[in-house]
Structures are given as structure tokens and as C-alpha cells.
Image (spheres, coloured by chain):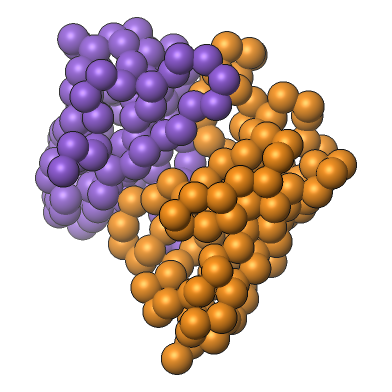
Chain colours: A orange, B purple
Amino acid sequence: DAKTTQPPSMDCAEGRAANLPCNHSTISGNEYVYWYRQIHSQGPQYIIHGLKNNETNEMASLIITEDRKSSTLILPHATLRDTAVYYCIVRAPYGSSNTGKLIFGQGTTLQVKP
Amino acid sequence: DTGVSQDPRHKITKRGQNVTFRCDPISEHNRLYWYRQTLGQGPEFLTYFQNEAQLEKSRLLSDRFSAERPKGSFSTLEIQRTEQGDSAMYLCASSLATGGAETQYFGPGTRLLVL
């Protein structure tokens, strides 16, 4: 079972910031938070990941709460092409007992509207 | 583009036929994963390889499924005696496991329809 909880759907106006929440209250100290998205009929696309600190790249920002029990993915200026299913996944690092597999939940369907 | 590639992108077959899918990972990635995704669901793990060794298989991988990665580069996933329930998107991902965070990159998938 997935270790994360996400709202099933969200809407966002084009040009506005999209803030996608994720609850991972049972996360372990060495587990990373990963975000992927999947545009219709395509393979999942890696967005960003983090452990404790907030992270930013060219696609998005990841804000992780101090207790690490939740996080928010921020798309700063959403476009219609950002319409997709967004998956939040927690995963132990390579080298631990982790087998490497990603466990996907249902994700959040983000609809960006004009 | 040197991303993960999969072939074919679409496959239609009749029940009872065998099918084989190919995945070419990103060059020098030592881990390769197979996932299956049915309509409306997130991807589900099937199996993975580290180099040429198959290290884990999901319970979803019945005896009709077999995967290989003979030289630690490309991989094949074969389904024997296909059933209508095998209809799904089959996704391949690769990663470079060097310690710490390991990011998997996915291919475009092979969509299988069993009639």
C-alpha cells in the first residue's frame, strides 16, 4: 500500500501557482519524498525529490514540513500543459533494505483551466 | 534524446498468443524496473534488475510472465498465453543506483490490448 495520501483532484487557473499537498505521516527518517506526474497516455515523468530541506528545480518547488509528515509540491505558474496526475511517493534510499520499487497511490488529478 | 525507450508502443493481440516487449534503459543505468498500469490506477511494480540479476518479482508476475536482462543493458518482458486481464500499459524505468537517493526515469510505455 502507498504510504502517502493525496486529494483525488484539484483545479488551478492558468498562470497561477498550483499547490499540491501530500500527507506522509508514517515516513521514516531516511525516506525521501518523490514527486512524479503522468500526462495522459504517457509514462510518469520525474519532477523533484527531497529529504528534509526544501528543494527547487526548473519544474517545481518542494516544501517539506519540519516534522516531515507532509509536503507540498508547488508549480509556480501553471500552464495547460501541467494538466496531469501527480504522484507523491516516499521511498527509502538505495543501500538500505529498500528494494528500489516505487509504490504509487492514486495521485492527484490536477486540471489547469484557462 | 537518450531517455528510456520502449518497443513497441502499442500491441494488439488475440487471447492465447505470446507477446514480447523490449526496454532500452538510459545508458549506464544499472537498475531496470518493469511496472504495469491499468486504466485509472497508478503503476504497479512487477520486477527489477540490478545489472543482469533479477532481484525481485512481484506477486503480480504470474508464471506466464518472464523478464530478462541478459547483458545488463536492454530488457525484455514476455507474456505467454495472454489473457484479457493482461491488457494494460507496461512501463519500464531505469536508474543509476550509486547510494542515497535514486531517481527512476520512465519510458513511454507499451500499451497492450488482448482481444
**Residue A111 in the image, given as x and y percentages of width and height:** 50, 78
**Residue B52 in the image, given as x and y percentages of width and height:** 29, 9
The answer to whether residue A61 is left or right of residue B49 is: right
The answer to whether residue A51 is left or right of residue B62 is: right
Q: Is residue B80 visible?
A: no
Q: How many marks?
A: 0
Residue drawn at (68%, 46%) of the image: A54
Residue A53 against residue A81 in the figure, above or below: above
The answer to whether residue A113 is left or right of residue B14 is: right
Query: Which quadrant holds residue A72?
Result: bottom right
Front in this rendered view, residue A107 or A62: A62
Front in this rendered view, residue A35 or A107: A35
Front in this rendered view, residue B106 or B82: B106
Residue A19 against residue B84 in the figure, above or below: below
Residue drawn at (63%, 52%) of the image: A62
Q: Is residue B26 visible?
A: yes
The answer to whether residue B37 is left or right of residue A75 is: left
**Residue A68 in the image, given as x and y percentages of width and height:** 80, 42
